[in-house]
Image: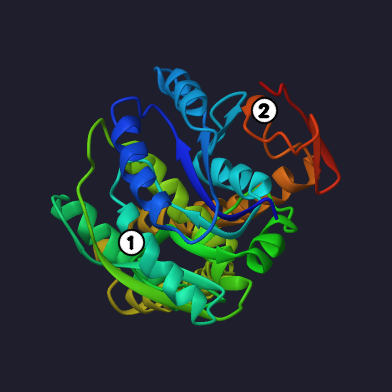
Amino acid sequence: MSCKYSFIVPIYNEEETLPELYRRLQAVMEQMDGTVELILINDGSRDRSLAIMRDLHDQDPRVCYISLARNFGHQTAVTAGLNFSRGQVVVILDADLQDPPELIPSMVEQWKQGFDVVYAQRTQRHRESWFKRLTAYGFYRILKQLADVDIPTETGDFCLLDRQAVDVLNAMPERNRYIRGLRSWIGFRQTAVLFERDPRYAGTVKYTFRKSLALATNGLVSFSTVPLRLSTYLGFFSAVMALTMAFVVIYWRLFHPASPITGHAIVAAAVFFLGAVQLFSIGILGEYIGRIYEEVKNRPLYTLSEIAGFKALHSTRTYSNRQEVIKDR
């Protein structure tokens, strides 16, 4: 390896945060007991983020950057960073400084104790709305109960990975990536480092409710088949309800013929109930079929427009039998 540590940071419209992020990461890099590369991934930013990344690279040769050809999403940007990382130890953290860089030395200490994966686990969320805290709390508990693997609660993508774990993740070709789930799925020795999550340093929140919901759905569908079983259970429940309603209607028709329950109301209720169950089941099937469709198209996971700082790399890289043609600055 050309360096011992790789720090991976996905960037999307973070011009206000990047200078402070680099300042704090630079202080951490000076403390490390080996060479460090800082990999910034521009995920289709529309502000001056890419220009700032170029300036940081010109000032500090340890700073490398990758510019995706468009916005491919946070999980794909992290995957691109993993593909290009060269360190024996790889650390993933977000750019908003809610993941404190100062926690990295503690994570490295756990790695030196023999752990291959060290994930940061939140004990408290500062200055987040009650709705955000409530939905996050509920989602992590539901996912833990339904997922086929044990995904720790209150964990994000902030983690340390040994090179062996990174190589396994890079060998996984799936498109709908949920990094924290894949991190648990691969196994190896894993442990947690506890921290209190700071508020965003500057700028606006990039993970809106819609994006958070999409990520949660992706995590649930990628690591659990329980939703498919749920549609089966709903179908069975509907059949039992329909049979019960049929007996009720017959009873009231025979013994209470003038009752309004034998009229259109009960028929309409039954139709709406069964229609809702059918649409819900079709929606669940659609989520799984949509992921199959994305996989079989076999398109590249991402395309690149510019890279800098990877002098040891060729101008064309291959991952999972796919080639990404890029311009090396």
Label 1's element? helix
Q: Which mark is residue 304?
A: 2
Quarter that holds the C terminus: top right
**In the depicted structure, whether residue 230 falls above or below residue 72:** below
Q: In this view, does 170 lie to the left or right of 24?
A: right
Q: Which amino acid does label 2 sit on?
A: Leu
Which residue lies at the image location 27% right of the left edge and 58% below the top edge? 135
Is 94 in front, or is 74?
94
User: Residue 292, image x and y in percent?
Assistant: 72, 51
Residue 96: x and y, percent?
Answer: 31, 41
Residue 129 vertical placement versus 135 (above, below): above
How far is the residue under mark 2 from the one under mark 1?
31 Å
| Closer-to-camera residue (76/208) | 76
Looking at the image, can residue 20 be seen? Answer: yes
- At 57% from the left and 74% from the top, the residue drawn is 116
What residue do we see at 21% from left, 52% from top? 198
Quadrant in which residue 165 is drawn = bottom right
User: On screen, 136 above or below 52?
Assistant: below
- Which of disc 1 and disc 2 is earlier in sequence? 1
Q: Mark 1 points at which residue?
A: 103
- Disc 2 vs disc 1: which is toward the camera? 1
Question: Label 1 is placed on what type of residue?
Answer: Leu
